[in-house]
Structures are given as structure tokens and as C-alpha cells.
Amino acid sequence: MRYLPTGAQMKQGDQKTITEMGMPSMVLMERAALSVVEMMESEQLDLKKVLVVCGSGNNGGDGFAVARLLHLKGYAVDVWFVGKESSMTEETRLQKQIAVHYGVPVKERVGEDCYTVIVDAIFGIGLSRQVSGTYYNVIENLNQMDAIKVAVDIPSGLSADTGDVLGIAFAADFTVTFAFQKIGMLFGMARKLVGKLVTASIGIEPSVYDGRGDVCYTYDRTDLKNLLPARDPDAHKGNYGKVLLIVGSPGMAGAAYFSAKAAYLTGAGLVQIYTAKENQSNLQQLLPEAIITTYERYEEEKLKELLEWADVVGIGSGLSMSETAQHLLSTTVRCAKKPCMIDADGLNILSKDRALFEKLTPDCILTPHMKEMAGLCGHSVKELKEERFRYFQEFLGSIPSVCVMKDARTLVGRDGRPVYVNTSGNQSMAKGGAGDVLGGMITGLLAQKIEPYEAGTLGVFLHGLAGDAAQKKKGSYSVLASDILDGIAEVLTAESTEMILREKC
Ligand SMILES: NC(=O)C1=CN([C@@H]2O[C@H](COP(=O)(O)OP(=O)(O)OC[C@H]3O[C@@H](n4cnc5c(N)ncnc54)[C@H](OP(=O)(O)O)[C@@H]3O)[C@@H](O)[C@H]2O)[C@@H](O)CC1
Ligand SMILES: [K+]
């Protein structure tokens, strides 16, 4: 698990390390600078002539220390100080003095010199407003220079909170960020401007955020072994849960197939599909492992019987907005009394039926993409993209359920729990059927008695890993939902083989 702090949260982490651990700020700064130099050497950058551009804040202090370390290693380095003497921090003032004492040239302007590497230490996480005036011109100038560009902590001009460019931003080839990747680096323009990212450990430990519910986090592949439900050697299919999927209106057998197969592949014991009669023969051929039960019209008693049979329910994929679909959703939400994943048309119906919306329980998981989310929360997609965390948190505050807001960076949350930000997956997954697969996976995890919030976070993470496996085989254009299904098996096979090996050791 990795924390993804905002700029302000990172500053609190710095301060906690300084005041509670007794780690001097100058030591953190030294380690930060050492990690930048180490990256430049290990990447074998051409360090013939380096320009370090420093601002007045502590980011500038890191820059002065980088310049001194390079100078002491025998590289030709110039510092260009673009900040204001009057607003320098104590540490930066000291770093500047030390650099000067060691003989590092500090310039107030740079001429026609050619530099092979430019190090940007103008603004870090302390950037607090739009970049304008001289700073704007400096960054514009640097971006035009023909050299390898290295950013210290974060490219100057990029918001550590949102990934927005505040006026202009340094376009880095490499960024060395300290302690944690900042949340803004995952969104907006950041992915293009950060370049190759190195996260350097400088003595600020993850425990600085322990016990806080407000810092976002993500998973890495190494987390899987702690997240996946154990498989008991004495188990039978009943141990892994009975899934009821209420999916697929006439002609939408595909949605039913993808979600049911995904639930099975993720480990569910038994899957029953409740679908329109027209889909029966297709589904029987596509997925003989599933029980297929059909409807021609809404039958309340039949539905209640099925809800009674199931341990968990998934509803919505390809369901349509018909009257039958509305009855199916309404009865499910009101009567299921068990974990229930609501997707696609289920969400569209919900957004038009506020009385039903009020009936959501802590056992429900909603999985809207941005357009469906717009319908649910009443903000446009543009507004959601601009202030995704604000509106997501606001929505979570209005429901007792878990919400999985799907986008290039999917968010998972529940009121009172930290927001999970997904970092697995790739652009090849933007295809029809991918969402049905995710819904099936989450339902499959619920069936294995994983709590809704954890089923959401793990389901989204695994889905992304499955997409990454698919992209390795099919590239960025040709991945289909069926390739993501194959990816699930690939990821879980690799993981369970490792688990078996670990148990035998
Ligand atoms: N011990 C630690 O804390 C450690 C910190 N570390 C390093 O410190 C960095 C954070 O340092 P920081 O907090 O001093 O802020 P920083 O990003 O240098 O900039 C603030 C300065 O910029 C100014 N300013 C802001 N926006 C502006 C704008 N648009 N246009 C113009 N000016 C603007 C602002 O001015 P003000 O708002 O006060 O007027 C202030 O002078 C962090 O990223 C990491 O690199 C590491 O060494 C690890 C240990
Ligand atoms: K910077």
C-alpha cells in the first residue's frame, strides 16, 4: 500500500518527521539532494554542464544542495537563482551559503551557455497560486532549451493536488519525488509533464499518516498476497459464495456473459444469471458453467426466491431502462438484504428514482463511470473532472454505500474511509464490456465474503492488472473485454502459484 498525499499533507508529513522523530530539516534536504544526484548518475545523464534553477522555498534549497553535490563530484554546475532574497526560507538561505562557500557559481541570469542537463528546483509542493511574470518567463525559457530536464520533487508549475498546470509548468524528462508520489501526479497533465518518475526514500516513513482517514492511497502488485481471500484445501463450491447476476435485457447477452465469467474467474463458487428469455440459448453455449434462469416479464415472487438463494447480487449490466428493469432493481434494492453491486442501467434507473436512492444500504456498491456519476450526483462530467475529489467526497457523504467512480484513474470510497486511487490498468481497456467485467469481478469478491469497500478496491486493482496483462499480449488498440477475462486468469494464476510455493517453503 502506498500513500498519495496532497501538497499540504506532504508538508504535514515533513513537519511530523522533523518535530516528532527529531530528524533535522537539513538532513532531509541532504537526502533529497543525494537521491536526485544518484538518479542522474544511474540514468547516465550527460552531466558535462548542468544548470540548477532555484527558487526561494525549500525546493530551491534542495536545488542548491544538488548543485553542491555535483560540483564536489567534479561536474561543471551553475546555479541560476530566480527567487527573491527576501522570501528565502532559513534552510534555503543556508544551502545557498554552503554552495557559495564550496565555490558553486550562483548567477542571477544565464547567458548563451549550453547546458546538457537542467535541474528545476523553482517550486515544489509549496506552489500556491498561478505562475506569472518573471517565473512564467523563466519556465517558458527552460522548456525551450535543448537539454535533458530533471524536476526536483515535482515539475514547477504543476499542482501537487490536482495535476493542473497553474499557468505554465516545467516539462520534465525525469522527476525525483520525495517520500511519496503526490496525488496530483496521477491526474491531468501531470502524466505527460513528470516524465520518468523515481520516488526516493529520504527518511519520511509511511507511519506519518497512520490513523488518518484523509490521505489517499493505492495498491501495488506486492499487496496482492495480503489482499486475496485464502482458498481452503477442503473447500467446496458453497464456500465461495452463490452469485446472482440480474443482467442482460433482450439482445444484451454479452453483458451477462462478461460479468458472469468474470465472477467465476475471480473465484466465486456458483453463478446464476437471471436474464431475458431471448438470451438463454446464447448464454448456455457461451458459459455452460453458469445456471441460466430467465424472465419474459417481471415476476416478483420468482425474483424474491432468487434473492433468497443468493449470497450476493450484481444488477444492472445491459439491463435497459424498461419497466421490467425498473421493477427488478426496485425489488432488489428494497428486499435483497445482502451485498449488492449496482452497475450501468441499474445506476441510470437509480438516478431517476430518488425514493429508491434513499433505500441504498452499507452493503451496496455503486460502480458509475463519469457520465453515470453525473446523473447520480447532479454535476456535469466537466465539473467532476475538474474537482473530482470534492464531488466524490460530497457524494459519499450522501449515501451509506461504497462508490467506485470509474475513469482513467478510478476512485473507490465510502464515507469515513480513505479514498483509494487506482494505478493499475491502461488505455487499451477503454472498450465495450470492460465495465461488465469489473462488475463481475467485484461481485465475485463479495461472494468470497470480502467486505464491500475492500471488494471495490481489490476488484478495481485486479481489473487493472488484468488489463495490463491483456495489453502486453494485444497492445494498446486490440484488447477486447474477453482479453481482460484472460488477463484475470493470468494474474490470479501467477499469484496463486506463488502462494502455493510460499506455503510449501
Ligand atoms: N523539511 C522540508 O520541509 C523538506 C522539504 N523539501 C523540499 O521542499 C519543498 C517544499 O518547500 P516549500 O514548502 O518551502 O515550498 P516551495 O515549493 O519551495 O515553494 C514555496 C515558495 O514559492 C513561492 N510561491 C509559491 N507559488 C508561487 C507562485 N505561483 N509564484 C511565485 N511564487 C510562488 C512561495 O512564496 P509565498 O507563497 O510564500 O509568497 C515560497 O517562497 C518540497 O517540494 C521539497 O522539494 C525536501 O527537501 C524534504 C524536506
Ligand atoms: K521543482
Image: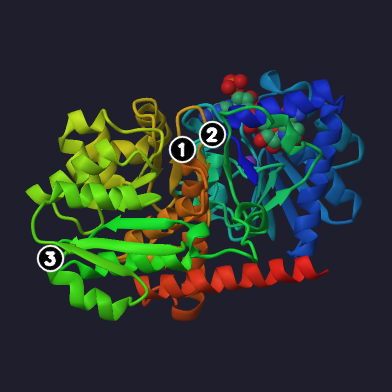
- In depth, the one of 78 and 229 nearer the eye is 229
Where is mark 3, residue-wise?
Answer: 250
Q: Amino acid at mark 2?
A: Pro
Asked which quadrant contains residue 9, the reply is top right
Residue 38 drawn at (x, y percent): 81, 55
Labelled pair 3, 2 in contact (Cβ < 8 Å):
no
Relative to 258, is 265 on the left or the right? Answer: right
Q: Which tag, 1 or 3, sits closer to the chain's start?
A: 3
Q: Which element is circle 3 on?
A: loop
Name the mark nearer the viewer: 1 or 3: 3
Where is mark 2, residue-wise?
Answer: 418
Residue 431 drawn at (x, y percent): 31, 66
Instruction: Tell me the distance, in whole angstroms, between the alpha carbons under discs 1 and 2.
Output: 7 Å
- Binning the other alpha carbons within 10 Å of mark 1 as few (below 14), some (14 to 19) or many (20 upward) gives many
Which residue shows up at 30% across the image and 36% down it?
383
| Residue 225 seen by the camera | yes
Name the mark nearer the viewer: 3 or 2: 3
Where is mark 1, residue-wise?
Answer: 413
Instruction: Tell me the distance, in whole angstroms, between the alpha carbons under discs 3 and 2.
Output: 39 Å
Q: Residue furthest top?
A: 86
In the displayed structure, 450 sits above or below 441; it is above
Q: How many marks?
A: 3
**Quadrant where ligand 2 appears:** top right
